[in-house]
Amino acid sequence: MMKNADVITLRSFLIALAQLDSPLPQEQQEKLNAIAPNIMANLGKLDAIAESYPPLDKLYQEAGMPEHDHARKRNKADLPTINYAAEQQSTETSNTLVAKIENLEEDKLQELATKVLENNLSPAQIAALLASGYPC
């Protein structure tokens, strides 16, 4: 059984990866590939990997906040967006991904993390994987 802090770390990292606008740089991806086969023994390394890439770190920190703060920050914007329909769809997609990851049982969370990290899945591929019902 995973400790609560480990569950939060793993969920937060997967949520952050799924919300990135582009795939991780090669350096961070190589670090993830190295720890993926034994992710549970290497959870502590996820913080350092996130910190080494500011866009990921920002999303990772937000994902680890209490749920009410997390949702508020995720939907907060300083200026109105030009394409309201696209923004709404993007927010809904993001919220759906977050909800799916947050509701995974521990074993399914570990399974998803291993698959994502070992296969260099991009944010779009993570979204497609979760939309397909994986892991069920």
Image (spheres, rainbow, N blue to C red):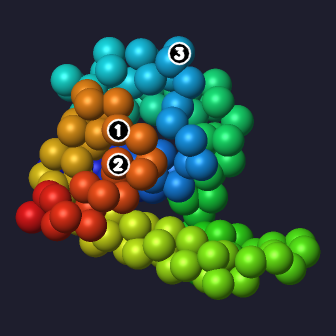
Asked if the residue under mark 3 is in contact with the one under mark 1, i.e. CB atoms within 8 Å, the reply is: no
Q: Position of residue 95 (x, y in %)?
A: 48, 75
Q: Is mark 1 on a helix, strand or loop?
A: loop
How busy is the neighbourhood of tag 2: few (under 14 within 10 Å), some, or many (20 plus)? some
Looking at the image, which residue is at 21% across and 39% down? 115
Give, as a three-letter code, the residue at label 3.
Answer: Glu
Q: Position of residue 4 (x, y in %)?
A: 34, 56
Real-space CA distance between mark 1 and mark 3, rounded to the nearest whole angstrom: 15 Å
Residue 27: image tag: 3
Q: Is mark 3 on a helix, strand or loop?
A: helix
Instruction: Using the image, determine if residue 101 lies above or below residue 41.
Output: below
Q: Name the residue under label 2.
A: 125
Give, as a three-letter code, the residue at label 2.
Answer: Gln
Q: Nearer the observer, disc 1 or disc 3?
A: 1
Looking at the image, which residue is at 52% across and 31% down? 24
Looking at the image, which residue is at 90% across and 74% down? 79
Residue 121: image tag: 1
Q: Is residue 54 visible?
A: yes
Q: In which quarter of the image is residue 32?
A: top left
Real-space CA distance between mark 1 and mark 2, rounded to the nearest whole angstrom: 5 Å
Q: Is mark 2 on a helix, strand or loop?
A: helix
Real-space CA distance between mark 2 and mark 3, rounded to the nearest whole angstrom: 19 Å
